[in-house]
Image: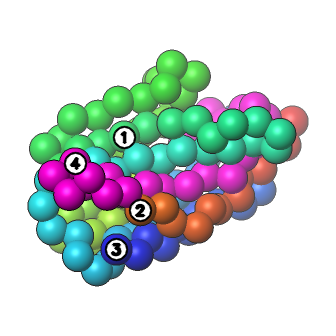
């Protein structure tokens, strides 16, 4: 499985960005798609997740501002980020987890920088 993340960039506080993560390869079966982020000097934290069954979870810090959704026809998961804050600045990574196969794949990160 290959994951290609895109959509990062520089935005002012209060602005919006949409990240995309396109999956290719053996992507069939039950899966959970995650967005993580890692700020400089900090650990990588889960931001949002969406399962193939439609279950969605968010980190408390992004609830009400970020929306995760997927287009299965395009094998793509998105992260719509609104009302961005400087503390949202991080490298954002997508991850695909296949629980039945017990395997997990990471995409390359995409940098989001929010200026104050």
**N-terminal label among 3 and 2:** 3
Among all residues in the image, which is located at the extreme right? 116
Residue that appears at 71% across and 58% down: 111
Residue underneath mark 1: 49
The quadrant in which residue 75 appears is bottom left
Q: CA distance from mark 2 to mark 1?
A: 14 Å
Dot 3: what SS?
loop
Foreground of the two, 54 or 25: 25
- What kind of colouring is applied to the model shown? rainbow
Q: Is residue 22 visible?
A: yes
Q: Which numbered mark, 3 or 1, is in the foreground of this view? A: 3
Is 55 situated above or below 59?
below
Dot 1: what SS?
strand
Residue underneath mark 2: 105
**N-terminal label among 4 and 1:** 1
Is 47 situated above or below 59?
below
Residue that appears at 36% across and 40% down: 49
Residue that appears at 26% across and 52% down: 102
Q: Residues within 10 Å of mark 3 (few under 14, many from 20)?
A: few
Residue underneath mark 3: 1
Q: CA distance from mark 4 to mark 1?
A: 14 Å
Labels 2 and 1 touching (C-beta < 8 A)? no
**N-terminal label among 3 and 1:** 3
Residue underneath mark 4: 99
The image's mark for residue 78 is none
Foreground of the two, 14 or 43: 43
Dot 4: what SS?
loop
Q: Position of residue 44 (x, y in %)?
A: 63, 41
Which residues, given as a range, are shown in magenta?
Answer: 79-104
- Relative placement, left or right, of 115 versus 36 is right
Labels 3 and 2 touching (C-beta < 8 A)? yes
């Amino acid at each position: 499985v290959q994951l290609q993340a895109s959509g990062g960039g520089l935005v002012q506080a209060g602005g919006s960005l949409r990240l995309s993560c396109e999956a290719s390869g053996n992507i069939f079966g039950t899966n959970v798609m995650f967005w993580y982020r890692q700020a400089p000097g900090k650990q990588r934290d889960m931001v949002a997740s969406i399962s193939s069954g439609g279950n969605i979870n968010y980190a408390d810090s992004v609830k009400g501002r970020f929306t995760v959704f997927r287009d299965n026809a395009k094998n793509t998961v998105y992260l719509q980020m609104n009302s961005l804050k400087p503390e949202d600045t991080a490298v954002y990574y997508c991850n695909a987890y296949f629980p039945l196969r017990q395997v997990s794949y990471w995409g390359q990160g995409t940098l989001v920088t929010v200026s104050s």
